[in-house]
Image (cartoon, helix red, strand yellow):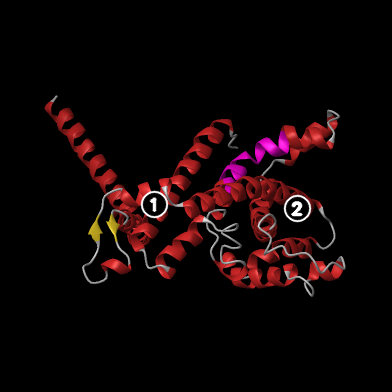
C-alpha cells in the first residue's frame, strides 16, 4: 500500500514539474511581446492618466506641473466647446464610415472572389488605396476637392464647389476619403473569410432552390460574422485616429467643423503646449474606444457562429 501511495505521489510530482516547464516556456515566449506591450501601450496610458491630473501648460514652465485633480476633465465636459464639436464630429464619422466601409468591402470581396479573369488585378486595384501613405492620400484628395482646377470641378465643369471650406460639406468630404482609403483593407479580411466557407453549403442551397439574396443572408453573412466582428472594431478605432489627413486638408477647419478628438489632442499638446489637457482628452478617447469595443464584442459575439 505504501509503495502504491509513493508511486502516485511521484507521478503527481512529475506531472507538476511537466506543467511547470510548459507554463514557464509559455511565459518566456510571451515575455518579449509583454515587454513591448508594457513599454508602448501600458506605460503611455498610465502616464497620460497621471499627467491629466496636472495643470501643465505655458504658465507652469518655471514652476512645473501643478496637481489639479479632475479639473481638466471638468473643463472639457463643461466649458470646452471645441471638444464637444470634435466629439460630435467623431461620432458622425464613426457612425457613417463603419457600416458603409463594411458593406462596400463585402461587395468588393464577393466580386473579387468570384471574378474569373484578372482576379489578381482586381484585388490589387481594390487594395491599392490602402498601400498609399496617409499624407499622400490627403494630397490626392486635396487635389480632387480643390475648386477651379480640382478633378471634381473639372469633370462636372463646376468652379464653385468648395468642399473643404464649406462647414456643411467638409465632414462629408473627409468621410468619402476615409471610406475610399479603408474599404480595400477591410476587403482582404472578407476575402479570407469567404475562402473559409465550405463550398458544399452553397451547393446544397442551390440544389434546394435558394436565390442569391437568400444564399447571402442565410449562409454568407452568418459565416462572415467572426470577420465582421473583428473588422468592425478596427474600422471603429480608425474613425477616431484621424490626424494626418486633417493636418493636410483642413487643420480642423473651417471653424472646427472638421476637427476631431485626436487632432484636438495634437492642437492642445503641440500648438498650445497644454499637455495636461491633451492627456485628459487622450484618456477620454481611450475610455471611449474601450467602451465601444467591449459593447461590440459582448453584444455581437453571442450571435457569432465560429466554424
> Is 280 contained in the magenta span?
no
**Nearer to me, 126 or 27:** 126
From the image, tell me which residue sits under label 2: 108
Q: CA distance from mark 2 to mark 1?
A: 36 Å
**In the drawing, does residue 276 fall left or right of residue 259?**
left
Tell me which numbered mark, 2 or 1, is placed earlier along the sequence.
2
On screen, residue 118 above or below 49 = below
Which quadrant of the view contains residue 300?
Answer: top right
Residue shown at 57% from the left, 47% from the top: 91
Q: Position of residue 222 (x, y in %)?
A: 67, 35
**In the drawing, does residue 72 fall left or right of residue 208?**
left
Q: Position of residue 48 (x, y in %)?
A: 34, 57
Give the secondary structure at mark 2.
helix
| Image: magenta residue range | 219-232
> Is 227 contained in the magenta span?
yes
Quarter of the figure with the C terminus: top right
From the image, tell me which residue sits under label 1: 283
Give the secondary structure at mark 1.
helix
Q: Residues within 10 Å of mark 1 (few under 14, many from 20)?
A: many
Quarter of the figure with the N terminus: top left
Q: Position of residue 224 (x, y in %)?
A: 65, 41
Amino acid at each position: 500500500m505504501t509503495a502504491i501511495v509513493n508511486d502516485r505521489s511521484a507521478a503527481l510530482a512529475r506531472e507538476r514539474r511537466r506543467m511547470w516547464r510548459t507554463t514557464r516556456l509559455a511565459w518566456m515566449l510571451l515575455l518579449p511581446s509583454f515587454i513591448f506591450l508594457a513599454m508602448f501601450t501600458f506605460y503611455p496610458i498610465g502616464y497620460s492618466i497621471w499627467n491629466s491630473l496636472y495643470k501643465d501648460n505655458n504658465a507652469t514652465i518655471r514652476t512645473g506641473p501643478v496637481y489639479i485633480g479632475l479639473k481638466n476633465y471638468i473643463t472639457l465636459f463643461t466649458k470646452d466647446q471645441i471638444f464637444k464639436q470634435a466629439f460630435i464630429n467623431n461620432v458622425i464619422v464613426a457612425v457613417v464610415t463603419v457600416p458603409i466601409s463594411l458593406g462596400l468591402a463585402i461587395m468588393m470581396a464577393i466580386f473579387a472572389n468570384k471574378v474569373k479573369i484578372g482576379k489578381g488585378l482586381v484585388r490589387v486595384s481594390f487594395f491599392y488605396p490602402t498601400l498609399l501613405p496617409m499624407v499622400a492620400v490627403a494630397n490626392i484628395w486635396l487635389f480632387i476637392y480643390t475648386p477651379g482646377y480640382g478633378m471634381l470641378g473639372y469633370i462636372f465643369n463646376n468652379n464653385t464647389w468648395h468642399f473643404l471650406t464649406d462647414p456643411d460639406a467638409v465632414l462629408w468630404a473627409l468621410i468619402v476619403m476615409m471610406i475610399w482609403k479603408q474599404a480595400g483593407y477591410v476587403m482582404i479580411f472578407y476575402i479570407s473569410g469567404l475562402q473559409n466557407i465550405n463550398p458544399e453549403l452553397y451547393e446544397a442551397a442551390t440544389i434546394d432552390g435558394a436565390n442569391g439574396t437568400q444564399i447571402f443572408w442565410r449562409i454568407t453573412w452568418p459565416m462572415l460574422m467572426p470577420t465582421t466582428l473583428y473588422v468592425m472594431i478596427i474600422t471603429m478605432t480608425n474613425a477616431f485616429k484621424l490626424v494626418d489627413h486633417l493636418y493636410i486638408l483642413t487643420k480642423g477647419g473651417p471653424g472646427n467643423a472638421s476637427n476631431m478628438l485626436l487632432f484636438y489632442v495634437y492642437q492642445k499638446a503641440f500648438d498650445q503646449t497644454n499637455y495636461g489637457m491633451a492627456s485628459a482628452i487622450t484618456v477620454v478617447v481611450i475610455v471611449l474606444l474601450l467602451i465601444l469595443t467591449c459593447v461590440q464584442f459582448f453584444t455581437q459575439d453571442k450571435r457569432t457562429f465560429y466554424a
